[in-house]
Each structure stands twice: as structure tokens, then as C-alpha cells.
Image (spheres, rainbow, N blue to C red):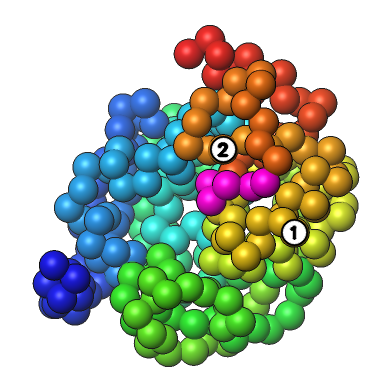
């Protein structure tokens, strides 16, 4: 089965098709590519990354400003655009130029009732600078800064030099976010450790993918910044806090937790 999957990935590399999000996310159009993985072509959209879509449902409200860090093909980006609506604003950060082109095609298709989409072709790290970025031989969803990444890459297709921004610097240039999704393939500890102003002043709700090797450090940073942690694969209930971040972690400022927990409890 694994060999068949690898064969199909090679044969169908970089094919593109237009799909639609589930109705709960406005049924908005989204351009998908096998470059991100075969699942984007063949699985129902609702089943591609159910935990990610669940996080969007739990956290995003009408009119929200949302940052999607590591946007990939834009599944969370477009889900957020449907949930935030025309008064919302979505900023998608993605350094892979191939995926940026796909995101821009998706952005051009959005109707007036969707939130405005801003696509920023850059990576995110602990500080501003140039970094080496590894393009995965298999699904580009596994692309990562060269120091990070995981075994799902299947090797490195090429190394690109990219511009990286920091969360604190972006706060000077962009509307402060209500919700931020972070999927940076192992670089999350570096990213948050260099973001004291972002965590102390902006204080958005976070949907963050946490590599096991970073769980202790991410827990220290977020709990130390006054965040409550939840497993993104479970409902946000009053007594469901977790001590150590999960793979898909929801983190909300303690002073705002009631907004999210109450909303989830009523669903």
C-alpha cells in the first residue's frame, strides 16, 4: 500500500482541482493540489483534517481577524474566511511559492460574503531573517525550515532560501489577531519563544500543532503566559484542561476561556 501511494504521488504530482468547503464553512471554493498530498484530491473535505476544522469551529466567530501560519493549501484559511464572514480578515502566511500561487487562486474565487484573504509569501520564525527551507519530496504539507521537519517528508526535493518574519514584528504591521493557527513542522517552540509581546499583548486564541519533542517547552511558554491548554481532538469543557500540550493543542488566554468553553458546551 505504501509503495502504491508513493507511485500515485509521483504520477499525480502538482495536479490541481477546484473543490468546495462544507456548508458549515460557507461552501466556499478552494483550489487543492496533489502537491499538498493525495488526500486533498480524493477525501471528502470534511475528512482531510477533521481536528483542524474542529479547531476553526471552536475558536472563530463572525468579524474575527485570523492568522494562519503555515497555511499550506489553505484548508484552515478558507474555513476561517467562511466562519469570520465579510467583516472578518484572514492573513495566510506560506513560504512555499508553489502553494502561494495556489492560495492566490483560491483568494481570487471568494465571494463578497467571505472574509478578506491576505496571502503573505513568507515563513515565520523566532526573528526576522533569511532561512533555508526544505521542500518535501512527498507531500508539500511536510515542508519545513531545514533545521526541523519530520519523517513524513520522504526526503528533500530542494532547499529554498526564504524570508522569515516574527510574530512580534507582524503585530506592528497587521491587525492584531483574535485567532492564530500555527503549523510550522517542529519550529513552534522557536516561534513562540521569540514572541513575548504577541503572547502578552495580542493574546489570541491558538490552534497549534505541537511536535512531541517540543511539548514541554510549549507548555512552559503558554502556561507561563497565562494560557489554558486543551486537546484539540476533544470538546472544550470547563474541566478538560491538559497539563502537557497534545499534537493538536488549543490554547486560550485564561481571561477569555469562558467565551470558548461556554460556546462549545452549548453545541
Determine contact: label 2, label 1, CB under 8 Å.
no
Identify the secondary structure beneath mark 1. Answer: helix
Is 159 situated above or below 98? below
- Where is residue 199? Give x, y as percent: 81, 47
Indicate which disc, 2 or 1, sits on the residue closer to the N terminus: 1
Magenta stretch, residue numbers: 244-248
Residue indicated by mark 1: 217
Is 245 situated above or below 241? below
Quadrant in which the N terminus appears: bottom left
In this view of the protein, can residue 53 be seen by the observer?
A: yes
- Where is residue 200? Give x, y as percent: 87, 45
Identify the secondary structure beneath mark 2. Answer: strand
Kindly identify the residue that appears in the image at 79 percent across and 29 percent down: 254
Residue 110 disc label: none
Based on the displayed image, in which of its 4 quarters is residue 114 positioned? top left
Q: Is residue 52 left or right of residue 122?
A: left
- Where is residue 30? Give x, y as percent: 32, 48
* Magenta run includes residue 51: no
Residue indicated by mark 2: 231
Predominant SS of the magenta segment: loop
Q: Nearer the viewer, residue 95 or 236?
A: 236
Q: Is residue 16 left or right of residue 191?
A: left
Tally the numbered discs. Answer: 2
Based on the displayed image, in which of its 4 quarters is residue 154 positioned? bottom left
Kindly identify the residue that appears in the image at 56 percent across and 38 percent down: 231
Q: Is residue 193 left or right of residue 14?
A: right
Q: CA distance from mark 2 to mark 1?
A: 16 Å
In this view of the protein, can residue 180 be seen by the observer?
A: no
Amino acid at each position: 500500500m505504501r509503495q502504491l501511494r508513493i507511485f500515485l504521488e509521483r504520477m499525480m504530482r502538482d495536479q490541481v482541482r477546484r473543490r468546495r468547503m462544507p456548508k458549515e464553512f460557507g461552501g466556499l471554493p478552494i483550489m487543492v493540489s496533489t502537491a499538498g498530498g493525495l488526500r486533498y484530491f480524493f477525501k471528502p473535505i470534511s475528512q482531510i483534517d477533521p481536528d483542524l476544522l474542529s479547531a476553526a469551529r471552536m475558536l472563530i466567530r463572525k468579524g474575527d481577524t485570523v492568522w494562519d501560519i503555515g497555511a499550506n493549501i489553505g484548508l484552515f484559511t478558507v474555513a476561517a474566511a467562511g466562519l469570520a464572514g465579510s467583516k472578518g480578515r484572514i492573513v495566510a502566511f506560506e513560504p512555499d511559492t508553489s502553494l502561494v500561487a495556489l492560495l492566490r487562486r483560491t483568494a481570487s474565487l471568494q465571494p463578497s460574503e467571505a472574509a478578506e484573504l491576505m496571502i503573505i509569501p513568507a515563513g515565520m520564525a523566532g526573528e526576522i531573517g533569511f532561512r533555508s527551507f526544505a521542500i518535501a519530496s512527498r507531500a508539500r504539507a511536510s515542508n519545513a525550515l531545514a533545521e526541523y521537519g519530520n519523517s513524513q517528508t520522504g526526503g528533500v526535493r530542494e532547499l529554498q532560501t526564504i524570508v522569515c518574519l516574527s510574530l512580534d514584528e507582524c503585530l506592528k504591521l497587521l491587525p492584531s489577531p483574535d485567532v492564530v493557527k500555527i503549523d510550522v513542522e517542529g519550529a513552534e517552540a522557536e516561534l513562540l519563544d521569540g514572541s513575548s509581546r504577541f503572547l502578552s499583548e495580542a493574546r489570541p486564541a491558538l490552534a497549534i500543532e505541537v511536535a512531541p519533542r517540543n511539548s514541554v517547552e510549549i507548555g512552559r511558554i503558554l502556561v507561563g503566559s497565562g494560557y489554558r491548554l486543551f486537546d484539540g481532538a476533544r470538546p472544550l469543557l470547563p474541566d478538560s484542561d491538559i497539563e502537557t500540550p497534545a499534537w493538536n493543542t488549543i490554547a486560550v488566554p485564561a481571561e477569555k476561556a469562558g467565551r470558548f468553553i461556554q460556546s462549545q458546551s452549548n453545541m
